[in-house]
Amino acid sequence: MAKKVSNNFRVVPWTGHQHPTLSTIVTLLKQQNYRPYHWENTPNYRYAVRTHNYRKVFYVVEGSVDVSFPDENTVVRLRVGDRLEIAPNVRHGIQVGTTGVRCVEVSLPQ
């Protein structure tokens, strides 16, 4: 079940019985005709607040991240399997968790 957090973003928890693998998520996104790519970062890495002119969708495959939405004074913690969808032009920042993170992402046109 999707957990709608805001008009600007949506968190969808993983509903499978096991945590998804990188291969599982990539396959799922390719079946939806998306072109996924993966990225990872070291523990506690911080991405400055930014916006994108496209819809950003990503899954956490390993580790965790806290995604902040300063215009809404909201922070969302994402763990393995969680999917986050961010609308275009929404300000957000990312703080990587204490064990690092690996994510699979797609960029969708507006």
Image: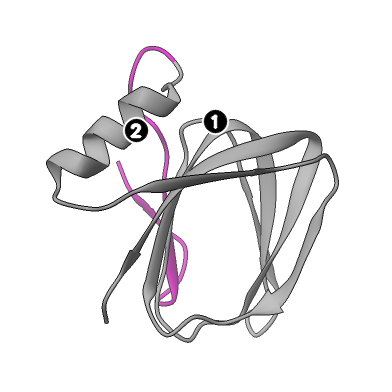
Identify the image quadrant of residue 72.
Answer: bottom right
Q: CA distance from mark 2 to mark 1?
A: 11 Å
Report the side of 84 relative to 96 (left or right): left
Of residues 53 and 92, the one nearer the viewer is 53
Residue count near mark 2 (Cα–Cα under 10 Å), binned few <14, some 14–19, many ≥20 = many
* Magenta stretch bounds: 1-18
Choose between 22 and 96: the one closer to the eye.
Answer: 22
Above or below: residue 48 compared with residue 61: below
Q: Amino acid at mark 2?
A: Ile
Question: Is residue 13 inside the magenta stretch?
Answer: yes
Q: Position of residue 13 (x, y in %)?
A: 42, 38
Q: Which residue is mark 2?
A: 25
Residue 104 % position (x, y): 45, 43
For residue 80, the mark is: 1
Query: Residue at 41% across / 22% down in the picture?
Result: 20
| Closer mark to the observer between disc 2 and disc 1 | 2
Q: Which of disc 1 and disc 2 is earlier in sequence?
A: 2
Q: Is residue 86 magenta?
A: no
Quadrant for the C terminus, please. bottom left
